[in-house]
Amino acid sequence: MISTVVLATGLTLILIGIWGMLTHRNILRIVIAFSLISTGTHILMVAIGYVASGTAPIIDRGLSTTEAPMRAVDPIPSALAVTAIVIGLAVTAIMLAFAIRLYEAKKTLSIDAFTESKW
Amino acid sequence: MAELIGSLLVLAGAVFHLSAGLGILRMPDAYTRMQAGTKASTLGNTLVVGGIAFFHPDWTLKLLLVIYFVLMTNPISAHALARAAHRIRVPMTPQTTVDALRDAREQSRGGA
Amino acid sequence: MIRRAGIVLAVALFGLVFATLTVHHVERQSLPPLAKRYVELVPRELGAPNVITGILLTYRAFDTLGEVAVLFMVAAGVGLVLGRRERRTETSFRDAPQPSRQASEIVRTGAQILVPLIAIFAAYIITNGHLSAGGGFQGGAVVASSAILLLLADPRQRFDQQFLSSTESAAGVLFVLVGVAGLLFARGFLDNRVLPLGQFGTFFSAGAIPLLSVLLGAKVGCELSVIIDRFRV
């Protein structure tokens, strides 16, 4: 039940991001929509690894070494999500760098002004 | 008894968060939206974290540090955003009659 | 008109696929076999209470090395795209800033209080990677956020690009050298048993994982600060 709710939240965020990316004409809003898609994907990855009534895979006072294989949540998607978040930040940085150069070239932030790549 | 007080505080915090979201949707221009979003959500945060302190009394010092940190960062960041918005001349709603920052900047530029 | 219809059709099809995924999702009842082996092996063999950091820095350490390479490529890419703007802005820094361009006093005072707190918090997250939630990447991102705060408080401030670049390169080289030491003295590349395992759960334990976390945090922090510095006006 919990993981289904979190899964639906992640997929809804991805859907909103896809809609925003296709609809808006301002470059910065398209970048924000990409960031939404990437956040939704991180939530999706963590939701897939949930084990019913499980807890975080960290051994401390609440979870001892012997009962960890019974009760811990899957650690592999969480490790992949850690990597993905940092790479998402770096990709957003390079998208914003391109947006700055595009603005300096044409003095406008609307992508309708850049038609050289269209057929 | 302590849990009742804690639950009431968390409920009050949630009501303030709801009013912050409502304010962001309904306010006319960027400055009033920023004011609604920051003030109400900072107070909502403080009340929710204070309510949690009644549920777990041994976490009180850490939760007070969290409240202090939120109180330090939220208003400062909203202040920086509002000044930046005023600098690039984001238009104010016509219902606002006083613009103290523009008068102060003209005075300093005219005098300097 | 056609474009709007196409957008609605695309979003509706995606929505249909996602709805099917959500409806047929069945919550897992027990760990898959590979995850169960990792959860058993990491506290026993590596001596690290945090299973995720143990996986990231020993069993899947090659992926971490690849991600470090990706971050370096992005830093070089941002430097290439935004590099030539530096020359145009040199002249504007020589004259005194107008009062309206300076950061306000509230932001400057707030930055003076907050930057030490953020730095301590970043150091705590980096060094506690093997005991509780945390690690090199998360702490490096917090270091970069303190760099943003410094730039907001004083827009004329220059970061020492030479120091940041050399720290980042040195941290990367040391990371690979510790990995090669694992190849020579322990059981594989980036194995953490080059250093003694120590007692489970204390600060100086889990072999080379705290050292690798510190190197990773320094590298990621310097890299993100260099990227942010490129965006200055």
Image (cartoon, rainbow, N blue to C red):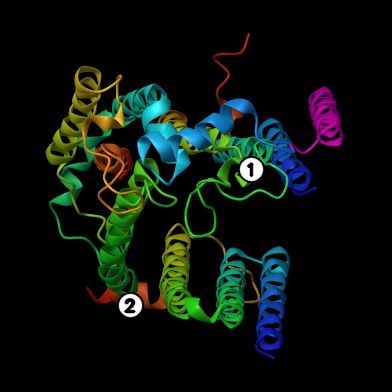
Q: Chain of mark 2?
A: B
Q: Looking at the picture, tell me which residue is in the foreground, B45 or C12.
A: B45
The residue where tag 2 is placed is B107
Q: For mark 1, does the 10 Å Cα neighbourhood hold few (<14), some (14 to 19), or many (20 or more) residues? A: some
Query: Quadrant of residue A118 in the image?
Result: top right
* Kind of residue at badge 2: Gln
Specify the amino acid type for callout 1: Met
Q: Is residue C161 left or right of residue B42?
A: left
| Segment tinted magenta in the rendering | C1-28
User: For residue B18, what is the image quadrant?
Assistant: bottom right
**Image quarter (top left, top right, bottom left or bottom right) of the C terminus of chain B:** bottom left
The answer for which chain carries disc 1 is: A
Question: Any magenta on residue C126?
Answer: no
Please provide percent x and percent y for residue C99.
26, 68
Q: Measuring 69% from the left and 66% from the top, which residue is drawn there?
A: B21
Return the residue at label 1.
Answer: A70
